[in-house]
Image (cartoon, rainbow, N blue to C red):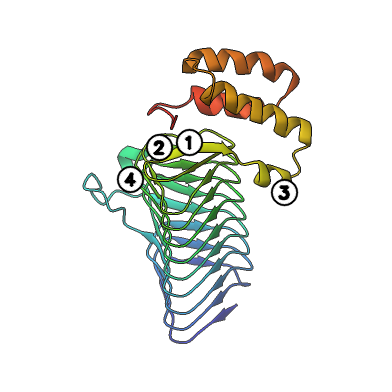
């Protein structure tokens, strides 16, 4: 363990012996930090935070702070972070609220660029990229492999589907289905995230089926339920469409369409 002498560590914190903590950090009570994690100078970890292995927190990050929600009354809530994540300068990560499930959760292998904000009760999957100054409001869910461009903002209680891409400076006010690219003001679904899917090893036939699904949803004047029924028929020969169908059927706030 390497802890700079200027750091302040609460006695109730649990820190693995293979953790590096830089100058002027503050680690509060009930903070658990897993092996291989590096904490650069001037990071504050407020309280009630569970951090997995091999994470990297850059300077001036604020981790596990009280939720910015008037419904929060000091109840015990948590921030849970998986393994192999990178949190760049000035990232802010808030704990959950009692009425919102009690936890904010972030998966594995995510990149959070400078000044990203993840609010209370959010659920972020794995392998995501949040570019500079992205902000997601309370209770937002972001699926695996999603990419959010710089300065994008997501309203509370919304969902960004797996493998979706949100363009820079885009205001998200409805759910984003899996695989879709959304950009502009007002936000508009442009196409499928074909380049991202290629990079992740989706074969040409699967990408073609997802492209056909996009046309069914957005180009052929079907109602949403009619489009879902069409996709279910196609999914018999393309398992990847099940992820898209699930993101459509689980939408409570309506999709960008």
Instruction: Residue 131: give x, y in percent of width and height.
Output: 50, 59
Quadrant location of residue 49? bottom left
Say which residue label 2 marks.
158
- Horizontal placement of 201 versus 220: left or right? right
Say which residue label 1 marks.
176
Near mark 1 (Cα within 10 A), the count class, few <14, some 14-19 or many ≥20, is: many
Q: Residue at x 41, y 61 (%)?
A: 133
Say which residue label 4 marks.
97
Looking at the image, which is closer to me, 13 or 219?
219
Q: Secondary structure at mark 3?
A: helix
Alpha carbon distance from label 3 to label 2 = 26 Å
Q: Residue at x 43, y 48 (%)?
A: 104
Q: Which mark is residue 199?
A: 3
Looking at the image, which is closer to me, 96 or 192?
192
Near mark 3 (Cα within 10 A), the count class, few <14, some 14-19 or many ≥20, is: few
Q: Secondary structure at mark 2?
A: loop
Is any part of residue 193 visible from this angle?
yes
What number of labels is visible? 4
User: Are discs 4 and 1 less than 8 Å apart at CB?
Assistant: no
Q: Which circle, 4 or 3, is nearer the viewer?
A: 3
Q: Secondary structure at mark 4?
A: loop
Name which of mark 4 and mark 3 comes first in the sequence. 4
Q: Secondary structure at mark 1?
A: loop
Name which of mark 2 and mark 4 comes first in the sequence. 4
Name which of mark 1 and mark 2 comes first in the sequence. 2
Name which of mark 4 and mark 1 comes first in the sequence. 4
């Amino acid at each position: 363990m390497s802890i700079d002498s200027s750091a302040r560590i609460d006695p109730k914190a649990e820190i693995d012996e293979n953790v590096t903590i830089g100058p002027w950090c503050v680690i509060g009570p009930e903070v658990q930090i897993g092996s291989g994690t590096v904490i650069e100078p001037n990071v504050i970890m407020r309280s009630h935070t569970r951090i997995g292995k091999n994470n990297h927190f850059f300077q001036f990050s604020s981790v596990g702070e009280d939720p910015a929600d008037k419904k929060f009354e000091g109840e015990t809530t948590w921030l849970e972070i998986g393994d192999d994540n990178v949190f760049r300068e000035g990232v802010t990560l808030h704990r959950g609220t009692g009425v919102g499930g009690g936890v904010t959760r972030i998966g594995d292998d995510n990149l959070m660029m400078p000044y990203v904000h993840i609010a209370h009760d959010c659920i972020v999957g794995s392998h995501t990229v949040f570019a500079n100054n992205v902000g997601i409001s309370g209770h937002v869910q972001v699926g695996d492999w999603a990419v959010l461009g710089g300065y994008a903002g997501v309203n509370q209680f919304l969902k960004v589907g797996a493998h979706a891409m949100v363009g820079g400076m885009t205001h998200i006010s409805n759910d984003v289905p899996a695989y879709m690219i959304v950009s502009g003001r007002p936000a508009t679904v442009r196409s499928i995230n074909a380049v991202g899917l290629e990079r992740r090893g989706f074969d040409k036939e699967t990408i073609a089926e997802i492209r056909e699904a996009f046309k069914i949803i957005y180009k052929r004047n079907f109602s949403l339920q009619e489009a879902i029924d069409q996709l279910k028929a196609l999914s018999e020969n393309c398992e990847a469409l099940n992820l898209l169908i699930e993101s459509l059927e689980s939408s409570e706030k309506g999709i960008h369409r």
